[in-house]
Amino acid sequence: MSTVSILAAEESSGGVQFPPIENVVEWPNIIDAISFNKISLICLIAFGVPVLLFLFSKKDMIPGKLQAFVEGIVQFIEEQIAKPGVGHGYEKYVPLLTAFFLFIAIGNLFEVIPFFQMPMNARMGPPLVFALTAWAMFIGVGVKNHGMGYFKEVLFPPGVPKALYLLVTPIEFLSTFIVRPFSHAVRLFANMLAGHILLITFGVLTISTFELSLLIIPSAGAFAGLVAFTAFEIGVSFIQAFVFAILAAVYIGGALHPAH
């Protein structure tokens, strides 16, 4: 029996149906006056959790479990993201990169948390804010360290024949200052939205086929797929946070050391 037939049978019997597509990414307001909805709540929690982690991790000579955990996160950001991405002078950018990683990772994990089951970054708003923050940061770093000559370094790379600047300069302008923040945001948004839709699909298929007693084997297969993809999406939540942070580090490093 095809998926369409299953859904038709379920609809006619009043059973489980696939949710309308708008329900996948749109949520009613919790507080109408300020348009506060589920995504807003997730953003608030994703922001508050790291803040509380750092506030309550005391700097003792003999670190406790919480302090060791927080220090491990910071060390990971330093060694795996800031140092290789930014290069020399990376230290001052560790707080920003840590904020990116934790905010995005925690927001993504709400995809598999019961009663929420929606990744924060499956909506374009949060990834766009993160990407524009990184965009403003690397431009600010470039101008601060190299003055307006930073734009010359980017738009007129040395070693290129002058005649080719007619082609190279517009491409560099578009790729660095226009396309870069857009692709930075879309990469995170698209991956999380795709995973969210995938989990919804397997979840609804599991329930739908379970309702039909003759489809025990397909139901078991759908449930196995749901479990597997749930575990996969937990990993993707951290991977996407890492990818976003490392790209931000590379952009900052490129502005800090444009000659390299």
Image (spheres, rainbow, N blue to C red):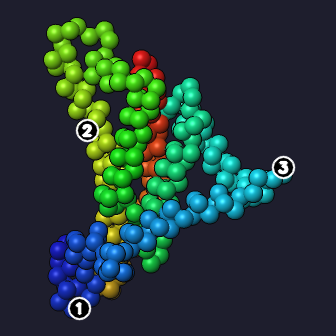
Q: Nearer the viewer, residue 229 or 43?
A: 43
Q: List the single residue furthest toward the right.
A: 62
Q: Which residue is mark 2?
A: 179
Give me the disc on residue 31: none
**To which quarter of the image does residue 215 belong?**
bottom left
Q: Is residue 194 above or below residue 208?
A: above
- Of labels 1 and 3, earlier in sequence is 1
Q: List the single residue furthest toward the bottom.
A: 13
Q: Which residue is mark 1?
A: 14
Q: Is residue 2 above or below residue 157?
A: below
Instruction: Say left or right for 69 vs 30.
Output: right
Closest to the camera, between mark 1 and mark 3, is 3
The Cα–Cα distance between marks 2 and 3, rounded to whole angstroms, is 47 Å
Does the residue at mark 2 contact the one at mark 1 (Cβ under 8 Å)? Answer: no
What residue is drawn where x is 35% and y is 20%?
Answer: 149
The Cα–Cα distance between marks 1 and 3, rounded to whole angstroms, is 63 Å
Instruction: Say left or right for 215 vs 66.
Output: left
Q: Position of residue 225 (x, y in %)?
A: 39, 65
Quadrant housing the C terminus? top left
Q: Secondary structure at mark 3?
A: loop
Q: Which residue is mark 3?
A: 61
- The type of residue carrying mark 3 is Met
- The type of residue carrying mark 1 is Gly
What residue is drawn where x is 21% and y is 92%?
Answer: 13
What residue is drawn where x is 32% and y is 81%?
Answer: 32
- The type of residue carrying mark 2 is Val
Residue 36 visible within the image = yes
The Cα–Cα distance between marks 2 and 1, rounded to whole angstroms, is 47 Å
